[in-house]
């Protein structure tokens, strides 16, 4: 299992080409969460504001983005869809913050504040669920425009990671 994580981080650090099977994406995600929890705990024990977790998060940002792009490629979607979804979530977050600040300043009625927050929350949750479904979806069988099927040989051959 850890071999999938090592392959993503060390051998395919910024590889946005090819396809990533579900096991590659989810094992990377699992170990990423575990290492993040460990580095956060160390930061808390050492009372560090900017410490190991910040360095670790910056170090794995690009491989995490790359494996997400390749995962979307495996289901026949462009990796740029991920950027569009992230931008929509960021815009919705700004709407929520703006609605909160306006309500705190007394410039909006409670009804308009509630409606704005509900719409933004529905957008964020809807996009997050849609992204989760795409990451859980089985990849296209056979070759697609992003490369050959990484499961075509029927094995768990990790040498196929990132191959176009």
Image (spheres, rainbow, N blue to C red):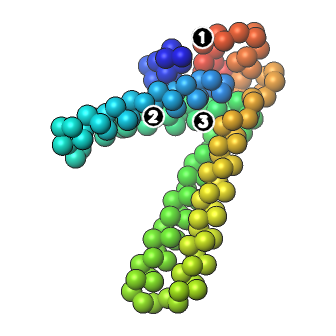
Q: Which mark is residue 89?
A: none
Between 30 and 156, the residue placed more toward the observer is 30
At mark 2, the secondary structure is: helix
| Residue at numbered disc 2 | 33
Image location (x, y in percent) of residue 8: 51, 23
Q: Are marks 1 and 3 in contact (CB under 8 Å)?
A: no
* Placement of 97 over or under 125, stated as above or below: below
Q: Residue at horizontal 50%, vertical 34%? A: 64
| Residue at numbered disc 3 | 69
Alpha-carbon neighbours of circle 1 within 10 Å: few (<14), some, or many (≥20)?
few
Taking the image as drawn, is residue 151 in sight?
yes
Which quadrant of the structure image shows residue 158? top right
Q: Is residue 50 left or right of residue 59?
A: left
Q: Are marks 1 and 2 in contact (CB under 8 Å)?
A: no
Image location (x, y in percent) of residue 120: 59, 68
At mark 3, the secondary structure is: helix
Image location (x, y in percent) of residue 145: 75, 29
Q: Residue at horizontal 59%, vertical 65%? A: 121
Distance from the alpha carbon under mark 1 to that under mark 3: 18 Å
Q: Is residue 88 left or right of residue 139?
A: left
Q: Are marks 3 and 2 in contact (CB under 8 Å)?
A: no
Which quadrant of the structure image shows residue 141? top right
Image location (x, y in percent) of residue 65: 52, 37
Q: Earlier in the sequence, mark 1 or mark 3?
A: 3
Q: Is residue 159 left or right of residue 30?
A: right
In this rendering, the label closer to the viewer, 3 or 2 = 2
Q: Earlier in the sequence, mark 3 or mark 2?
A: 2
Q: Residue at horizontal 54%, vertical 81%? A: 113
| Residue at numbered disc 1 | 159
Alpha-carbon neighbours of circle 3 within 10 Å: few (<14), some, or many (≥20)?
many
Q: Earlier in the sequence, mark 1 or mark 2?
A: 2
Taking the image as drawn, is residue 51 in sight?
no
């Amino acid at each position: 299992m850890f071999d999938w994580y090592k392959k993503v981080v060390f051998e395919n650090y910024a590889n946005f080409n090819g396809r990533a099977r579900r096991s590659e994406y989810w094992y990377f995600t699992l170990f990423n969460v575990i290492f993040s929890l460990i580095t956060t705990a160390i930061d808390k024990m050492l009372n560090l504001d900017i410490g190991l977790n910040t360095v670790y998060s910056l170090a794995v940002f690009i491989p995490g983005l790359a494996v997400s792009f390749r995962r979307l490629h495996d289901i026949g979607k462009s990796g740029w869809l991920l950027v569009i979804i992230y931008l929509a979530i960021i815009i919705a977050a700004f709407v929520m913050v703006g609605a909160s600040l306006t309500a705190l300043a007394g410039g909006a009625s409670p009804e308009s504040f509630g409606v704005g927050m509900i719409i933004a929350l529905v957008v964020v949750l809807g996009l997050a669920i849609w992204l989760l479904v795409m990451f859980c979806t089985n990849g296209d069988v056979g070759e697609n425009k992003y490369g050959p099927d990484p499961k075509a040989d029927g094995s768990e051959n990790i040498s196929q990671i990132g191959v176009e």
